[in-house]
Amino acid sequence: MGKQKIAIIGAGLGGAVAGSLLQHSGFDVDVYEQAPTFSRLGAGIHMGPNVLKIFERIGVAEKIVSISSTPTFWLSRDGISGEYLSRIPLEGYGHTYCTVHRGDLQALQCDTLKDGTLHFGKKLATIEDTGIDVHMTFEDGTSASADIVIGADGINSKIRETLLGFEKPNYSGWVGHRALINAERLKKYDLEFEDCVKWWGPDRHMMVYFTTSRKDEYYYVTGVPHDAWEFETAFVDSSREEMHAAFPGYHPVIEALIDSTETVTKWPLFNRNPLPIWSQGRLVMLGDACHPMKPHMAQGAAMAIEDAAMLTRCLLETGISDYATAFKLYEVNRRDRATRVQVVSNANTFLLTQEDPSWVYGYDVYAEPLRTEDAA
């Protein structure tokens, strides 16, 4: 690949996987992350078979399976009566379905990057496409240049702002509560705490699952209507009292989960209108930078990782020198799928009733023929 260089802004799951896939493909890649370091933040995540197929390419699929809970069904239940609304198989889609702690997954992803190519404490201050290369400056006073830059920097992407101007994301009118529970605390209840279950109320829900292969950690995340987000911070502390008030009269399992909660936080759910462009010049975006969505399908990070795989395929097809064609190919081959998932996720109907999720989980980004229409 010569001395041509790729820079990735953001080392979240999409950025880290993009860096690893591109490096495994022979590209010279550096990843810049604004956080001073990664910590094991209190959040779980789903990684479906569509993503595990990508993890195979960077050699971590087996490791991820080994640290994850691997539910065989997604259960949907009425949040008040407990009635089963659906029982969706999670096997038979070409790989394993995993639920895992986001921090544990992040650590494995970062370990796949070449030594010295992941740079922490690099919050992007300015970025300029000179026409010859891209010049970046960071808030710590350092700078770097690359031939192309990939924005994997989330819903508040500096790359998106550079291309389209500053615009606050749209508050969705929903918040999500997040809590990790020591599974030992649940043993005193004569109740069944299932591997992967979504409890549905008339206008809210609670998604619950184990985050480790040992099943010693149970996680829940909610979706609850909330009129306005009046806080300046990314999240605020919540409480058992607030949780009980949000789920009054709900099933005894939900009551037990709330009673067993030691620490719970509350996060606003934001989204954006579909963007007119995903790239311009030497800059291109992936994941939440270009198609953020509510987390109700557990596919937001998966879409960023699929983006990373498709973008790598397209750059391998054209080389960095013809980045313009690669970026067009990438958008042509990702926009329809990402948009479909975005729409379904925002609607919060996925797997509520018995349905076939093979269009999501059975997808293999490497088996899809590259469409070229509109790419030239």
Image (tube, rainbow, N blue to C red):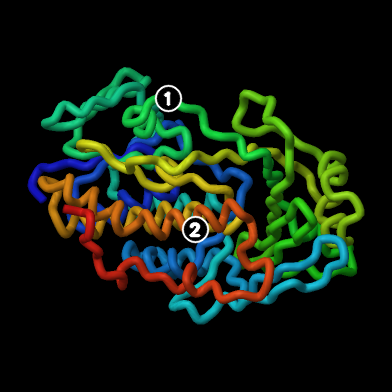
Any part of residue 122 in sight: no
Q: Which residue lies furthest to the top in this view?
A: 141
Q: Where does label 1 land, which residue?
A: 166
The residue under the point 31% across, 70% down is: 368
Q: In this view, does 263 lie to the left or right of 135?
A: right
Q: Where does label 2 land, which residue?
A: 341
Going by the numbered disc 1, the residue's amino acid type is: Phe
Position of residue 238 relative to residue 362, above or below, is above
Q: In which quarter of the image is residue 282?
A: top left
Q: Is mark 1 on a helix, strand or loop?
A: loop
The residue under the point 23% across, 55% down is: 374
Q: Residue furthest left?
A: 2
Taking depth in this image into account, of 300 and 216 the one nearest to the observer is 300
Number of other residues with Cα within 10 Å of mark 2, as a class: few under 14, some 14 to 19, many 20 or more:
many
Q: What element carries label 2?
A: helix
Number of other residues with Cα within 10 Å of mark 1, as a class: few under 14, some 14 to 19, many 20 or more:
few
